Image: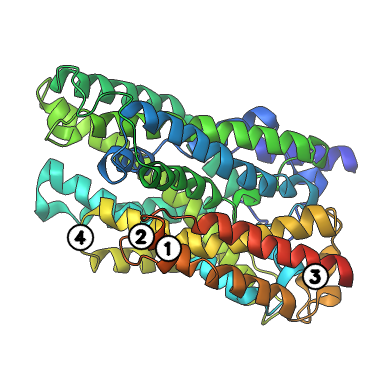
Amino acid sequence: MTQFADKSAHAAAASPFTIENETIFPIPEERRHGNAWSLLMVWIGANQNIMAIMTGMLYPGICHLALGWSLVAVLCGNLLGGVFMALHAAQGPHLGIPQMQQTRGQFGSTGSLLIIAIIILMYVGFTATFFAIGREQSAQVFGPGYGQIPIWGAVIVVATLCAIGHDVIERFISGFIPVAALTSVLLALAYFGASHGQLALPIWATPTAHQFLAALSLGVLWQIAYAPYVSDYTRYLPSRTGERTAFLVCLTGSIVGTAFPTFIGAYLGSTGFSGNMYDAVRTYSPILPILLFAVMIISTLVSCTMQIYCAALSSLTFLQTFRPDWNPTSRSRAIAAAILLLAGAIITINLRGSALEILDNVIALLLAVLSPWTAINLADYYLVRHGNYDIPSLFRGDGGVYGRANRPALVCYAIGVIVQIPFLSTGLYVGSIAQSLGGIDLSWIIGIFVPGLLYWTWARRSI
């Protein structure tokens, strides 16, 4: 019987178009599959997208960094944030459940609803930003009259992928890597030719502390933004994979996968070429802008699929809190994904302004609400409970041993958000301490260490 189950599991894993039946409940060991290599490919491929390139453009464009210092900021920021992200990834093979389900272990069954709701809004916000980027790209290639068409096309494709589930998404992400990497290299060469190899600033022009820290924060948040769902993509790995392997592979894959397109974007923004990326390739052939647009749109589909798949799982976790006897199915996941995609599309249609400015503001705000959560979750998992959770309690309406609401954890989270306010320095708001420091944003440091230390101090005395 066990051998038959193993064969069935392997057969299902071999066919990525088999509909995934698991949703928010623990993945049985016999249905787990994958290895370190497949996980590495997922996290390299997950970052090969237009948003990574545009984020790279923020380094010279918004942070005013020269190319050499942009590379340093890209690597340091992604390494620092990647450590926190990869620590979450290690939870997947051990627990076998989505990250937001595990969050009930820190905040309680109803107390976690606030966090889950914020995370769902984050997913929808990122998806809307991707849609906005797609609309802007479409307008640059085909004119403003075609701006909304990519949005609805993306809704259909992403909804289909999310309905099929994990395996097809994993194959889709991994298969896109060579196309994205080659396109990025060719795009950089096109900019090199268009700018005649000139840079707007000397390659090692010294930045101010504010400029460098602002750029560093971009990489930190890029990685921390994956924290709420990174274990959603590691929960299918066999438990024998181990936490150390999952940590190292996710860290390596995400840093390499992010640094490459982000640095390409930083180079594009550093050349001083006045046109857009489609202008840069149009001089070589009129068909190239269309091919480039196709690759960029596929990259948005990769990222939107990752966002919405996990948003759907988080939504099912949210709803299951009110109906603990409910067993959400693949159809439930598909319906949730479709609703969230429609929400993202509607937001985008009513969204105005440059996608680059929107992206910068979204990144700044998300950092403030994600940092305290990641600190509390990691402190609880590694320092307090050492990975030991009562899984059945995570699915009970009353929270089981974790209760309905863990007030100290919620207080620590609220403090973690509030203490960042004076340190914030964004396009929307600059705090008093940030002003006194010349506009340097240290909020993400405060948002990680203050709530993490507070929670650990409280939890070790009461658990």
Percent of width and height locating residue 333: 56, 63
| Residue pictured at 30% horizontal, 52% vertical | 153
Mark nearest the camera among 4 and 3 is 3
Task: Name which of mark 4 and mark 1 comes first in the sequence.
Answer: 4
Residue type beneath disc 2: Thr
Residue 458, labelled with which disc?
Answer: 3
Mark 2 and mark 4 lie on one chain; the one further toward the N terminus is 4
Q: Nearer the viewer, mark 1 or mark 3?
A: 3
Q: From the image, tell me which residue sits under label 2.
A: 426
Question: Real-space Cα distance between discs 4 and 1?
Answer: 17 Å
Give the CA distance from mark 1 to mark 3.
27 Å
Q: Quadrant of residue 3?
A: top right
Residue located 21% across and 57% down the image: 148
Please tell me whether mark 2 sits on a helix, a strand or a loop. Answer: loop
Near-viewer residue (199 or 235): 199
- Residue 73 at x, y percent in the picture: 44, 36
Q: CA distance from mark 2 to mark 4?
A: 17 Å
Q: Indicate the amino acid at tag 4.
A: Gly
- Asked if labels 1 and 4 touch by Cβ distance under 8 angstroms, the answer is no
On the image, numbered disc 1 is attached to which residue? 365
Question: Which residue type carries mark 3?
Answer: Trp
| Nearer mark to the viewer, of 1 and 2 | 2
Q: Amino acid at mark 1?
A: Leu
**Going 72% across and 80% down the picture, which residue do you hit?**
407
Badge 3: few (under 14), some or many (20 or more) residues near its Cα, within 10 Å? some
